Amino acid sequence: MDKEAQISALVSEETRTLLERYVAKTGMKKGRVIEDALRIHLEALRELPSDVLVPARVVVTKSSGEKLMRRLEAPAKPNAALRKLLRDDD
C-alpha cells in the first residue's frame, strides 16, 4: 500500500453536499472517493490532448463580461461561409 499523506482543500458547499450524499448512499469513505476522483482527473489530464480539455470553471472579469454581453446583444451577421454551410445538404 502506498504511504498516505494528508491534503486539505476548500470546496463549495454544493460540492460538499454532493460528497456527503454520495458517501451516505454508498458507504464509501470520503477520503477514498476524493482520492479516486482526483486520480482519475489527473490521469485524464495527462492522457488527453490539451486542446480538447475544457476548464471546469471559467473566470470572467468585469471587463471581459461586459465585452461578452455586448457581443451577445449584437451578434455578427452571417457571412457567406456560414450561409453556405447551413445551406449544404451534404
Image (cartoon, rainbow, N blue to C red):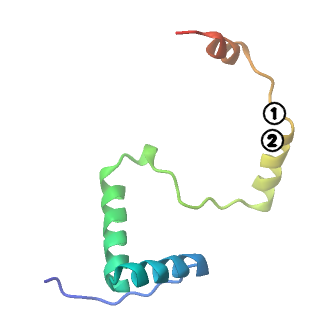
Percent across and percent down for residue 6 are 34, 90
Total tally of numbered discs in the picture: 2
> What's the residue at 31%, 72% (across, down)?
36
Amino acid identity at mark 1: Pro
User: What residue is drawn where x is 81% and y is 23%?
Assistant: 77
Towards the viewer: 48 or 18: 18
Residue under the point 54% across and 76% down:
15
Q: Which mark is residue 87?
A: none
Distance of label 1 from label 2 (alpha carbons): 6 Å
Q: What residue sits right under mark 1 in the picture?
A: 75
SS category of the residue bearing label 2: helix
Q: Are there few (<14), some (14-19), or many (20+) residues within 10 Å of tag 1?
A: few
| Residue 51 falls in image quadrant | top left
Q: Would residue 87 appear left or right of 79 to someone viewing this image?
A: left
Vertical position of residue 40 compared to residue 71: above or below: below
The answer to whether mark 1 and mark 2 are in CB contact below 8 A is yes
Residue under label 2, please give it.
Answer: 72
Q: Where 70 sits versus 12, above or below?
A: above
Task: Estimate the x, y position of residue 14 in percent, counting from the top left.
Answer: 59, 76
Q: Quadrant of residue 17?
A: bottom right
Asked if residue 83 is positioned above or below residue 69 in the image, the reply reads: above
Instruction: Give above or below for 78 relative to 37.
Output: above
Q: Nearer the viewer, residue 13 or 81?
A: 13
Between 52 and 29, which is closer to the camera in this rendering? 29
Of the residues shown, which amino acid type is indicated by label 2? Leu
